[in-house]
């Protein structure tokens, strides 16, 4: 049966950044519109791809949906509740259920923490688990699920490859059992051979955990491989949406047609 209510949605989201502050008092600030009136929805267990060129507003949209940035206008709803009007319990649930995986995992990891501490961190900071033995068990189970060797737990990020670090980032996102993971260019910094392994790992883990993914990439070929539905962004607006098949095989918008053509040209 079709699900009626999205798990997460954004309504008429706009974002303006101040790009230049004038020294003279009273002169207006120069603003840049990174997002205009964007609406977005994702349902349980599905993968929605967000694709567009660099600067099109993909990360800004992902960060607003995930609560890392405030929109200038518009609202975000998680499980039917506006995130701005959530009580403490609802907000805690939203934070737990929305995790991120970024392009540069090494850059976002504390180099002085062991991998087991990095993966355990969200369990502790979100107050999900206090028992040391349970934390250890959950961390070790995740290390094995993402295909890392047991010994990795006691290493530091600097001792791992980019692909191994991205597996750690996936383990850290999944350890709290989120409903949605926002993957922002998760394979763009990796070698082509490693990219496919990580994409397939994400797909396999989704089968087990039934989580949804918001999958952000500039590469429509990768997005088509991962997503059930695709949202195409250009200069802060959505220019086309549809099932992956519709958008990739029969793009209607000229900008989407250009993205598809350039994806084939790079093969
Ligand atoms: N903090 C900020 N201050 C000013 N402008 C910003 C800020 N963050 C983003 N922008 C601008 O907003 C636009 C959208 O940025 P965003 O990072 O969302 O793009 P993107 O589609 O994720 O690009 P990429 O593929 O390069 O990651 C860009 O033009 C960017 O320069
Ligand atoms: Mg980005």
Image (cartoon, grey):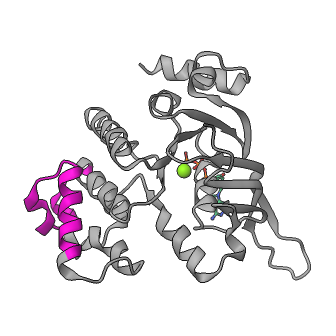
Q: Is residue 154 magenta?
A: yes
Height in image: 238 above or below 178? above
Viewer-side residue, 258 vs 38:
38
Q: Is residue 161 visible?
A: no
Q: Quadrant of the C terminus?
A: top left
Quadrant location of residue 115? bottom left
Height in image: 12 above or below 139? above
Total residue callouts = 0
* Residue at 45% across, 34% down: 226
Relative horizontal placement of residue 24, taking residue 243 as reference (left or right)? right
Quadrant location of residue 56? top right
Q: Residue furthest left?
A: 151
Quadrant location of residue 91? bottom right
Q: Is residue 246 magenta?
A: no
Residue 247, horizontal then vertical, whole percent: 63, 24
* Residue at 53% across, 30% down: 220
Residue 125, horizontal then vertical, whole percent: 39, 80
Relative horizontal placement of residue 146, taking residue 182 as reference (left or right)? left
Q: Quadrant of the N terminus?
A: top right
Relative horizontal placement of residue 77, taking residue 104 as reference (left or right)? right
Ligand 1 shows up in the quarter that is: bottom right
Q: Main secondary structure of the magenta part?
A: helix
* Residue at 53% across, 33% down: 228
Q: Is residue 105 visible?
A: yes
Residue 69, horizontal then vertical, whole percent: 63, 67
Residue span colored magenta = 134-162
Height in image: 230 above or below 30? above
Residue 57, horizontal then vertical, whole percent: 65, 49
Q: Residue furthest front?
A: 1
């Amino acid at each position: 049966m079709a699900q009626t209510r999205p798990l997460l949605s954004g309504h008429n989201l706009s974002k303006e950044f101040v790009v230049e502050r004038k020294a003279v008092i009273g002169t207006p600030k120069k603003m840049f519109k990174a997002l205009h009136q964007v609406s977005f929805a994702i349902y349980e267990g599905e993968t929605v791809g967000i694709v567009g060129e660099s600067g099109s507003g993909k990360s800004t949209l992902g960060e607003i949906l995930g609560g890392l940035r405030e929109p200038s206008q518009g609202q975000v709803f998680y499980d039917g509740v506006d995130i701005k009007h959530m009580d403490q319990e609802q907000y805690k649930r939203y934070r737990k259920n929305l995790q991120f995986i970024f392009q540069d995992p090494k850059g976002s990891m504390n180099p002085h923490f062991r991998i087991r501490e990095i993966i355990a961190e969200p369990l502790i900071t979100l107050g999900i688990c206090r028992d040391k033995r349970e934390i250890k068990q959950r961390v070790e189970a995740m290390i094995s699920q993402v295909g890392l060797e047991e010994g990795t737990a006691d290493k530091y990020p600097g001792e791992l490859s980019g692909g191994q670090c991205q597996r750690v980032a996936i383990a850290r996102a999944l350890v709290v059992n989120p409903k949605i993971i926002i993957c922002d260019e998760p394979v763009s910094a990796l070698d082509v051979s490693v990219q496919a392994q990580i994409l397939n790992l994400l797909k396999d883990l989704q089968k087990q955990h039934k989580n949804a993914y918001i999958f952000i990439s500039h590469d429509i070929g990768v997005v088509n491989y991962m997503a059930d539905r695709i949202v195409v962004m250009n200069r802060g607006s959505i220019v086309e949406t549809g099932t992956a098949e519709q958008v990739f095989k029969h793009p209607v918008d000229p900008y989407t047609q250009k993205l598809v053509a350039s994806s084939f040209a790079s093969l």
